[in-house]
Amino acid sequence: MLALDDLCRRATMIRAGAAEFENERRPSSWYGRCEKCGAAQWLQWSHFFSRARHATRWDLDNVHALCAGCHYTWAHQDIEGFRQWMSERLGRARYSALVLRAGRSGRRPDLAAVKVYLQSALKDLLDGGHDAAPGKA
């Protein structure tokens, strides 16, 4: 699952235009603009629905590149504001579909299929495509 997390994090950060840095102090960290406030910061991989919900853990509509302040002070504290932002960002139809996917219970998703989905989305982003970007479909 860590490989899938890395693929999803990479796609999320590239979609946000962040650059990856590796050194002793911040191994594999991403620097760019927060998708919420726009400030240039070290970014964190943030989920609308918890990573514990495997149905949406690696869903690119569910993840964002947020600075620490927006991630912990806003997203985790202002649930209604985060919900409104998500709805506006994705549009009503995509937001509703994400909510339905998150509500699935039972079996974990096919991890091989998730890997193919993420690799395809990452390739599209690296090739300059925007299909994986929220609000751009």
Image (spheres, rainbow, N blue to C red):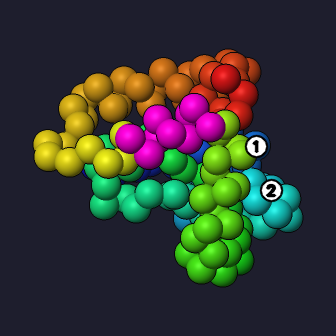
Q: Residues within 10 Å of mark 2 (few under 14, many from 20)?
A: many
User: Which residue is drawn at the image coordinates 36% and 24% (left, top)?
Assistant: 116
Residue under numbered circle 1: 17
Element type at mark 1? loop
**Place of residue 79 in the rendered image (x, y in percent of width and height, measured from the top left):** 58, 70
- Quadrant in the picture for the C terminus: top right
User: Which residue is drawn at the image coordinates 31% and 55% (left, top)?
Assistant: 53
- In the picture, measured across the screen, residue 119 lies left or right of residue 89, that is left
**Place of residue 9 in the rendered image (x, y in percent of width and height, measured from the top left):** 52, 49
Residue 128 appears in the picture as rendered: yes
Name the quadrant containing residue 45: bottom right
Q: Is residue 79 above or below residue 28?
A: below
Tell whether label 1 touches label 2 (CB within 8 Å). Answer: yes
Give the residue type at disc 1.
Gly
**Place of residue 98 in the rendered image (x, y in percent of width and height, measured from the top left):** 46, 41
**Magenta-span inclusion, residue 93:** yes
Residue under numbered circle 2: 33
User: Which residue is drawn at the image coordinates 80% and 56% (left, top)?
Assistant: 33
Q: Is residue 91 above or below residue 80?
A: above
Residue 126 appears in the picture as rendered: no
**Place of residue 103 in the rendered image (x, y in percent of width and height, measured from the top left):** 32, 48
Chain part drawn in magenta:
92-100
Q: Residues within 10 Å of mark 1 (few under 14, many from 20)?
A: some
